[in-house]
Structures are given as structure tokens and as C-alpha cells.
Image (cartoon, rainbow, N blue to C red):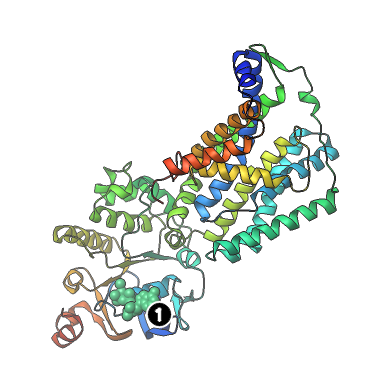
């Protein structure tokens, strides 16, 4: 433990700003991945254990598009869309075959998919680390806030993630298709009897969840190194986020992701060897106090 | 006679290995209100599920205006013009009344949009006063009205009502009966499954009686009223 260092940081505005900003972007990436995971669980009733692979796909396809076009906008769009398209194909051809099966079967299928996706990345992009580098538009001096320095790209990530989250929330709650998706989550047979193609909708929702993971991967590409297998730690952390926030709750995912992000960034100073322990401790605490998660529906 | 809006020919339906329907024949003409009567367990709900594509018949056919729909997915059967209202009032409880209707809005099989939310609220004034209420908070009778209204939003050619009076207080049953009569008088074609014969006598124009998965009688409602033997044998409780 390094409590003096933590106290020293908390006493310094610059350090607090730096840690909060890095905690926020970790949290925002987790929020995007977790909200996709949560959306898929809330509507389809399955946990997409392969969700991290779509985060990875988003990052690699963003890199590919960036190398081809030198446009970061194109990179974001292509990364997110590629993840979505792969997601729809994965749902249609593989996951839909194990709906209603034992969770262990679904876990096994997803684990196999993770291994295959990781190997495909090795074949297509190579096994070694890849870096995208900061897009020119953000290669500016960091913004100074209360003595601390925040890269302009962090602000962009924050805004993008919040916009995506808000868009998702509005889409689910205010649009007709969102209302149909919420009905699908509750009574799919009735939705089908009303003339709605539920299989298509399931694939679409799964794809949307993967788009969110892919967007997170694409947004992470300039600030993370890309490796085959980069999806796994993100999957585990976003899984913790959905458990803390409440499975199926998008606002819950936001709160929990920020909590985890800040726990990580401040924990890394105060408890450098116990950061993962802090996260799991937080999850255990929530499971004991509120088993359905902070904002999850009670008694599921 | 014209081609029936809905026709079932020799439908055999199984749940797993056990056969539930045995060669069921049924025909409903445009504008008719057909009562499908029979005791609990006779096979009424199964007949509806077979028509709606949820329990597809293994033999026989379901025809909509002469076109076969059996074997198609339930959503395609619905788009072809079947408006199936299942038993147990399956409203979307965490959607408002308005949103329950919006979810179900679609054009009819010939592109018609006769039923809109405005039109629904004219015909169902009780619902108009609770547009923004969660459907789960409605009374049983109100939920039953909402499920009927919701299915009408899909502009079906025929409305299938599975035991709309089940589990409701007598005064509410009367209100539901008035509503169905009103729809009938507006020209809506209706097939209504009921154990409660008295409920149907004042509503239906025709009746088909089903027992142990087989159709045992089919006639106009007046003929049924005059046939004590059938009523005693299959419908007395
Ligand atoms: N899912 C099912 N699996 C097996 N048997 C069923 C199932 N649903 C209904 N049955 C049986 O089929 C018969 C007809 O049921 P049903 O169509 O619900 O009758 P009704 O609606 O006339 O009361 C009953 O004997 C019932 O026990
Ligand atoms: Mg029944």
C-alpha cells in the first residue's frame, strides 16, 4: 500500500485532474463495451462471453481503415460497423443455435469464438503489438485544467462515449423500434404474434451491442496498443461493470463503469499491487448488499 | 359461398407425441362472428395456436382468403392478416397504454391503415383516459380491452380472441361483450374461443363446437340455441 502517495496526489489539483481524466476514459470505454453486453443480455437473455472479441475487431478494423484513408472519422465508422457486421453474422450462424441451451454450452461456444477471432487477427494483422498513433487532429498541446494536463483526445472520447450512451438510451426509450425491442425483451412470442420478425430483431440487437463494443475498440486504438487477445481483460472488466450496475441497465452500466474507472486510476496510486483486487472487492460488496446491481431490476 | 377469410382443413396438431387436434375443419366468412365453443381442454387454444403458426399442424392446411399460411412463421401469419389475441391478457406491462398500441401498429395485408391510435381511442374511450398509464397497472378488464385494441392496430382481416371473458367479474364480462358486439357491428370478422356459451350467445352469429380435439357441430348461433342435445352434451358445465 502507498497511502502517503495517494494522500499526496489527492492534495494536488494537478494529480487529481490527471487521475480523474484517465479514470474517466477507462470508465467510458468500459461503459461502451458493458452497455452492449448489457443490451444483449437484457433483450436476448444471453451473456455474450465473446464480447471482447468485438472490441478487438473494432480496434483492428479502425487501424486498417486509418492506414488506408488517414481519416480518423472513417476509422471510427469502419471499426464500429465491421464489429456490428461480424456480430450479426456471429449471432445468426452460431449464437442463435445455442439459445435455450445450457449456459456452459454458450460459454464454450463463445470461448471457441474468442480463440478463433484471436487467431484470425494474428493471421490478418500479425501477432505483434500494433500502434495507431494519435490522429493529427488531436496532436495538439494538452488542455490545462486546474494545474493538470488533459489530452484533447480524452475530451473527444468522453464526448463520443456519452453521446453514444445517450443515443442508445433515447433510442431504446423514445423510438418505436426501441419500444419494440423492450417488448421483445419481455414477451417475444407476443411480439411475433403482432407481425414482427423477432429473429431479425434479435440479430439487429446483437449487432448493435457489437457496434458499441467496436466503437469502444476504435476509440481506444489511438491510446492503446493493439494485440490479439486484447479483448479478454476488457471483457472481464465490462462483465464486472454489468454485475455492479445491474444486468440489462444502461444507466447502471454508466455509473458502474465510472466507478471502476476511478477505482482503477486512484487505486493504481494507493494500492498499485491490488488494483484488480479492488475491482473484484467492489463487485463482491455490491453482490452482497444489492445482488441485482446498483440500478438493476430487483428480484430477477 | 365466397372463399372464407379463414379456413382450416383437416388440421392434426401434436404436442410432442400426443395428438391434440384430430382433423379439425373450420371456416369463417367475412363479417361473421364465429364462436369456437368447447369445454376446458377441448382444444380451443390449440386450434388458435395452430392458426397463428405457433403450433403448426402436422397434417392439414390453414388458408387465409384461399392462400395457405400453414408452415409459415407466426410473424408472417400475422402479416398475412391473422390478428391473434392469446389468452391471459399478455399486455406489455412496463409499456404505457399508448406504447402498447404503437408497438403493434402495422399496415394490413393489403396496405390498409384503417386502425390508428386515434381511431382506437374513439372505439375504446376507456383506454383514451389512461394513455400514459403503465399497462401493468390496468385492471383485468382494461388489460383485455388493451390486448384487443393492440391487435387491431395491426389491421388484421380476422380477429382471434382466446377466452376474452376468462377470470373477469360479471360486470366486466358484460363490458367486454358490448365491445365485441360493437366491433362485430363495425364489420370486423371475429373468431372467439369460449367455454362460456352464454357469453357467446348474445355476440356470435355462428358457432362451432369442439370436443376432445374434434369438431362435433357447426351451425348458426340460432340453430345452436335450438339444439338442446348439443348444448347439454358438450357445453353444459
Ligand atoms: N403445451 C402443451 N403440451 C402438452 N399438452 C398440452 C399443451 N397445451 C395444451 N395441452 C393439452 O391439449 C389439450 C387441449 O388444450 P387447449 O387447446 O389449451 O384446450 P382449451 O383451450 O379448449 O381449454 C388439453 O388436453 C391440454 O392438456
Ligand atoms: Mg384455452
Viewer-side residue, B232 vs B31: B232
Ligand 1: give its quadrant.
bottom left
Residue B211, placed above or below residue B28: below
Looking at the rendering, in which quadrant would you find the N terminus of chain B? Answer: bottom left
* SS at circle 1: strand
Query: Left of B226 or right of it: where is B60?
Result: right
Query: Left of A179 or right of it: where is B171?
Result: left
Q: Position of residue B123 (x, y in %)?
A: 27, 52
Label 1 neighbourhood size at 10 Å, few (<14), some (14-19), many (20+)?
A: many
Pointer 1 residue = B8
Residue B212, placed above or below residue B48: below
Query: Left of A290 or right of it: where is A59?
Result: right
Q: Position of residue A281 (x, y in %)?
A: 54, 39
Residue B193, placed above or below residue B219: above
- Which residue: 62% across, 32% down? A264
Residue A250 can be seen in this image: no
Q: Position of residue B61 (x, y in %)?
A: 46, 81
Q: Which image quadrant for residue A29?
A: top right
Chain containing the residue with disc 1 = B
Count of numbered labels shown in the rendering: 1
Query: Left of A33 or right of it: where is A74?
Result: right
Looking at the rendering, in which quadrant would you find the C terminus of chain B? Answer: bottom left
Amino acid at each position: 500500500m502507498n497511502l502517503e502517495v495517494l494522500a499526496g496526489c489527492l492534495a494536488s489539483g494537478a494529480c487529481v485532474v490527471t487521475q480523474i481524466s484517465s479514470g474517466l476514459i477507462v470508465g467510458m470505454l468500459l461503459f461502451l463495451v458493458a452497455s452492449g453486453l448489457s443490451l444483449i443480455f437484457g433483450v436476448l437473455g444471453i451473456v455474450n462471453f465473446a464480447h471482447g472479441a468485438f472490441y478487438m475487431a473494432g480496434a483492428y478494423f479502425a487501424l486498417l481503415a486509418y492506414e488506408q484513408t488517414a481519416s480518423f472519422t472513417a476509422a471510427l465508422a469502419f471499426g464500429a460497423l465491421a464489429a456490428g457486421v461480424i456480430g450479426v453474422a456471429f449471432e445468426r450462424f452460431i449464437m442463435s443455435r445455442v439459445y435455450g441451451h445450457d449456459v456452459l454450452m454458450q460459454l464454450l461456444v463463445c470461448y471457441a469464438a474468442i480463440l478463433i477471432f484471436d487467431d484470425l487477427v494474428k493471421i490478418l494483422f500479425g501477432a505483434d503489438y500494433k500502434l495507431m498513433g494519435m490522429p493529427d487532429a488531436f496532436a495538439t498541446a494538452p488542455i490545462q485544467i486546474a494545474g493538470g494536463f488533459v489530452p484533447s483526445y480524452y475530451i473527444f472520447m468522453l464526448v463520443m462515449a456519452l453521446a453514444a450512451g445517450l443515443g442508445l438510451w433515447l433510442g431504446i426509450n423514445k423510438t418505436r423500434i426501441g419500444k419494440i425491442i423492450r417488448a421483445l425483451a419481455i414477451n417475444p412470442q407476443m411480439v411475433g404474434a403482432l407481425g414482427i420478425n423477432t429473429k431479425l430483431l434479435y440479430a439487429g440487437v446483437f449487432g448493435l451491442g457489437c457496434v458499441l463494443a467496436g466503437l469502444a475498440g476504435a476509440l481506444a486504438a489511438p491510446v492503446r496498443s493493439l494485440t490479439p487477445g486484447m479483448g479478454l481483460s476488457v471483457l472481464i472488466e465490462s462483465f464486472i461493470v454489468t454485475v455492479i450496475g445491474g444486468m440489462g441497465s444502461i444507466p447502471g452500466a454508466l455509473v458502474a463503469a465510472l466507478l471502476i474507472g476511478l477505482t482503477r486510476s486512484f487505486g493504481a496510486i494507493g494500492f498499485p499491487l491490488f488494483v484488480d483486487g479492488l475491482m473484484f472487492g467492489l463487485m463482491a460488496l455490491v453482490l452482497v448488499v444489492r445482488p441485482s446491481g446498483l440500478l438493476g431490476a430487483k428480484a430477477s | 359461398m365466397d372463399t372464407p377469410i379463414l379456413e382450416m382443413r383437416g388440421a392434426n396438431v401434436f404436442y410432442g407425441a400426443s395428438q391434440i387436434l384430430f382433423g379439425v375443419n373450420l371456416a369463417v366468412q367475412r363479417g361473421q362472428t364465429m364462436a369456437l365453443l368447447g369445454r376446458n381442454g377441448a382444444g380451443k387454444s390449440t386450434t388458435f395456436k395452430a392458426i397463428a403458426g405457433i403450433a403448426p399442424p402436422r397434417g392439414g392446411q390453414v388458408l387465409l382468403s384461399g392462400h395457405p399460411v400453414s408452415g409459415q412463421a407466426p410473424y408472417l401469419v400475422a402479416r398475412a392478416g391473422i390478428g391473434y389475441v392469446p389468452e391471459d391478457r399478455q399486455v406489455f406491462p412496463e409499456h404505457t397504454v399508448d406504447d402498447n398500441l404503437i408497438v403493434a401498429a402495422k399496415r394490413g395485408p393489403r396496405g390498409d391503415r384503417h386502425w390508428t391510435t386515434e381511431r382506437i381511442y374513439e372505439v375504446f374511450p376507456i383506454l383514451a383516459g389512461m394513455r400514459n398509464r403503465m399497462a401493468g397497472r390496468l385492471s383485468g378488464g382494461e388489460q383485455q380491452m388493451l390486448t384487443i385494441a393492440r391487435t387491431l392496430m395491426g389491421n388484421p382481416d380476422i380477429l382471434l380472441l382466446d377466452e376474452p371473458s376468462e377470470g373477469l367479474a360479471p360486470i366486466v364480462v358484460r363490458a367486454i361483450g358490448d365491445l365485441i358486439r360493437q366491433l362485430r357491428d363495425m364489420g370486423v370478422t371475429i373468431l372467439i374461443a369460449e367455454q362460456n356459451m352464454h357469453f357467446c350467445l348474445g355476440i356470435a352469429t355462428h358457432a362451432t363446437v369442439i370436443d376432445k380435439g374434434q369438431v362435433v357441430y357447426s351451425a348458426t348461433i340460432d340453430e345452436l340455441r335450438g339444439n338442446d342435445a348439443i348444448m347439454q352434451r358438450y357445453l353444459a358445465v
